[in-house]
Amino acid sequence: MRIRLHYSLVLLLGLVVFSAAQAGEIYKWVDKDGTVHYGQQPQDLSAEPMNIKVPKSSAPSEPQNPTTAANQQPAAEGQSEEEAALRQAAEKKQQDAQKHNCQIAMKRLATITAGGRIYEVDEQGERVYWDDNTRQSKLAEAQKDVDKWCSQE
């Protein structure tokens, strides 16, 4: 059970880190039950923006389809071979991140659908087991993540 919780937390942290590379701001808030949430859009007035430093990337802001990236000409008019190589490296990096995020999202979805009791640790260090409503909402979130990250494979 403890391994499953750690695995889930690592997956959640990975999603937060990789989504921060795509997002402008990440917010943190605590709901009425004391559960800490992170997201791009605050769901509560008490949400505080987090100062996460993300290195500047030369990757395009829009994910690219691997087939279209391979079909592009190596160098556009007025673009040097070096710039074309940098652009292709950035696209490759973007595709690798997309694939990695897809794998994380699929593992998280599989963990939730596998059954068994899943819990989170609250601020007091106590286990809070998911009820059916929590499981269903987390399942819907996980499915959205799979749809988002795995849609281009």
Image (cartoon, grey):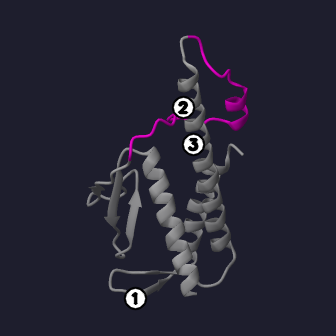
The three-letter code of the residue at mark 2 reads: Leu
Depth check, front residue: 96 or 63: 96
Q: Quadrant of residue 82?
A: top right
The three-letter code of the residue at mark 1 reads: Glu
- Magenta stretch holds residue 114: no
Side of 151 where 45 appears, left or right: left
Q: Where is residue 67 in the image (x, y as percent from the top left)?
A: 73, 34
Q: How many residues crowd mark 2 within 10 Å: few (<14), some (14–19), many (20+)? A: some
Q: What residue sits 54% from the left and 86% below the top?
A: 2
Element carrying mark 2:
helix
Q: How many residues crowd mark 3 within 10 Å: few (<14), some (14–19), many (20+)? A: many
Marks 1/3: CA–CA distance:
38 Å
Q: Where is residue 68 in the image (x, y as percent from the top left)?
A: 70, 30
The residue at which mark 1 appears reads as: 126
The residue at which mark 3 appears reads as: 94
Side of 62 where 71 appears, left or right: right
